[in-house]
Image (cartoon, rainbow, N blue to C red):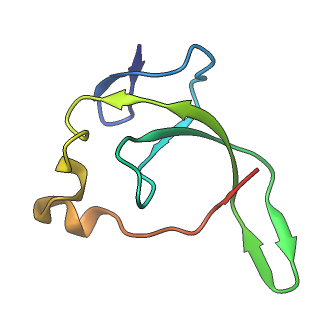
Amino acid sequence: LIITSDGRLGLGPARVQPDDEVWLLPGSRVPFVLRKTSCVTTSHLTSRTYELVGECYVHGIMHGEACSEENAGMGGMDELVLV
């Protein structure tokens, strides 16, 4: 059982930890749990790096609710590196 920082309930992999994050990745039908790792700096670019923990179910974001017009101002596309 997982509870997001905004109070949503969900189910995730057994190895989920308190500071893990739920991400919606383009092209995927389900959200994923990602875990921050150290930053990678190459040239003039610093990328946030994450480890894939696994797929999850989060009530209220499984059918596009997180991408609705009312939430459009709350997020956007972020660049990350999966390791």
Q: Nearer the viewer, residue 62 or 21?
A: 62
Q: How many marks?
A: 0
Residue at 19%, 36% in the rendered image: 60
Q: Is residue 10 above or below residue 30?
A: above
Would residue 52 be found to the left or right of residue 70 on screen?
A: right
Residue at 24%, 69% in the rendered image: 73
Q: Is residue 41 above or below residue 57?
A: below
Instruction: From the top left corner, tell me how far across and down residue 6 is, in percent.
Output: 31, 36
Q: Nearer the viewer, residue 77 or 26?
A: 26
Q: Residue furthest left?
A: 70
Residue at 76%, 73% in the rendered image: 46
Would residue 2 be found to the left or right of residue 39 on screen?
A: left
Q: Is residue 5 above or below residue 37?
A: above
Residue 58 figure quarter: top left
Q: Is residue 1 above or below residue 76?
A: above
Instruction: From the top left corner, tell me how far across and down residue 32 is, in percent.
Output: 48, 40
Residue at 56%, 25% in the rendered image: 18
